[in-house]
Amino acid sequence: MTSLPEIAARLQGYDPDDLDVATAQRFLSALVSAPEETETLALSQALDRVLAHDLISPINVPAHDNSAMDGYAFAGGALQPGQALKLRIAGRAHAGATWERALAPGECLRIMTGAVMPPGLDTVVPQELVTLADDGHVEIAPDLLQPGANRRHCGEDLRQGAVALARGERLTPAALGLLASLGLAQVQVFRRLRVAYFSTGDEIQSPGEAPRAAAVYDSNRYTICALLRRLGVEVIEGPPVGDDPALLEAALRRAAGEADAVITSGGVSTGDADHLRPLLQRLGEVIFWRIAMRPGRPLAVGRLGSGHRPAILFGLPGNPVAAMVAFIALVQPALQQMMGRRAQPQPLLQAVSGETLRKRPGRTEYQRGIVSTGTDGRLQVRTTGNQGSGVLSSMVQANGLIVLHHDQATVQAGQAVDVLMFDGAI
């Protein structure tokens, strides 16, 4: 098992007291790995699960040359430049049936979409482009199409023996349809990842409890657990834990014994009541990150316990927006890798800023934004206003995060910026 310092030593620009977002993402990518256990599921139960091995196509798709549309099939060699072509209709070919008899020169076959192309026929003229004669013939106008038109070739989608889906592929509705098109009823996937979560702090109380002085309701539990469920992991929720080192240690030990990853919120700063870092140093292995990002600067990452596969710990900040942003930017990609998905950058789109966005180089900023389409048809974005890390209502108003990168300075109105859209990210 590679140690955290060994991983850190391989990363250029590593500074545990001022880690940039890109380096933090590379660190996490090197730290985590997919589960070893797999299970076999029916396709109907496998939505959003992760494929555990390369899946080889057992057949050609399509299995035969077939017609791409309703029309008339014939031998394309009969087409002559500048000349009309008249053909006698010899019969009909429907999808799901085969036409065995070879056609004589000057004959064609009425054919339906998906029907197997009979021997010797390689071209289909759409039904709306022919002239039907009363004597059972069709006429094709000169220079209307080329030989081989409107024919789907055997194996043009997938060749037998080719990789249909690669290990680490998330099984989307399209991917499940592809597997079904190969005649497969089951698929082997990585087992579901188990993630434990609990909030920390004496000030935390659960919704439904009577308000008490100086307390705040536990919103992070609901936002982070909802984000986890969107990922498709098995969520193990624990009750809030106060600022008591003994209680926190017991909660961490219990969570590490139940889960592949443990996520906490709060208690990762440097205050007198922030006990997470010293506990992690005693219970496992930790590097405490002060990440050069806003919001979400304090973040603890480490391993809990020992043995073959210790649990990975993500200690999120306590402020509600900071916790969500740190999860989206850093924790979520790491968890996706732990689920078995291939590492890949988060997709960003570009939009024109509708206002000046003040920023200093040296940190990555995530501002809550509202993306819309301007009168010129281009995407535009504006902020939700107050960008305080406790303004959770701004995450409701926003449909994405404006990403102002580490080396970027102030953005003027009218300049393009990157946006990480919530739809697809969360």
Image (cartoon, rainbow, N blue to C red):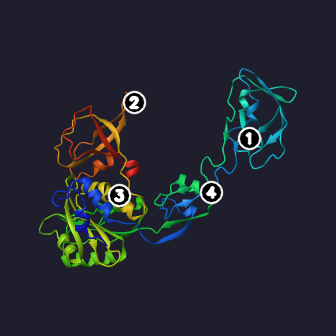
- Lower position in the chain sequence, tag 2 or tag 3: 3
Q: Which of the marked residues, 3 or 4, is nearer the chain's N terminus?
A: 4
User: In which image quadrant can residue 283 be found?
Assistant: bottom left
Q: Tell me how far mark 3 sits from mark 4, CA to CA.
A: 31 Å
Please say if the residues under marks 2 and 1 sit with CB atoms less than 8 Å apart: no
Q: Which of the two labelled residues, at mark 2 and mark 1, occupies the earlier sequence position?
A: 1
The secondary element bearing badge 3 is classed as helix
* Residue reaching furthest to the top: 82
| The N terminus lies in quadrant | bottom left
**From where the camera sits, is residue 285 visible?**
yes
Which image quadrant is residue 405 in?
A: top left
Looking at the image, is mark 4 or mark 1 nearer the viewer? 4
- Above or below residue 82? Residue 391 is below
Task: Say few, some or many: other residues with alpha carbon within 10 Å of mark 2 (under 14 / 14 to 19 / 20 or more).
Answer: few
Q: Kindly identify which residue carries mark 4.
A: 182
SS under mark 2? loop
Secondary structure state at the residue bearing disc 1: loop
Residue tagged by mark 3? 333
| Whole-percent x, y for residue 422 in the image | 36, 49
Q: CA distance from mark 4 to mark 1?
A: 22 Å
Q: Judge the density around disc 4: few (<14), some (14-19), many (≥20) Cα neighbours within 10 Å.
A: some
Tell me whether the residue at label 4 lies in contact with that at label 2, contact meaning CB atoms closer than 8 angstroms: no
Q: Give me the residue at 81% from left, 46% from top.
A: 99
Q: Are marks 3 and 1 in contact (CB under 8 Å)?
A: no
Tell me the kind of residue under disc 3.
Answer: Pro
Can residue 323 be seen here? no
- Which mark, residue 112? 1
Whole-percent x and y of residue 28? 30, 61
Q: Amino acid at mark 4?
A: Leu
Given the image, on which type of amino acid does mark 1 rest? Met
User: Distance between the Cα atoms at labels 2 and 1?
Assistant: 40 Å
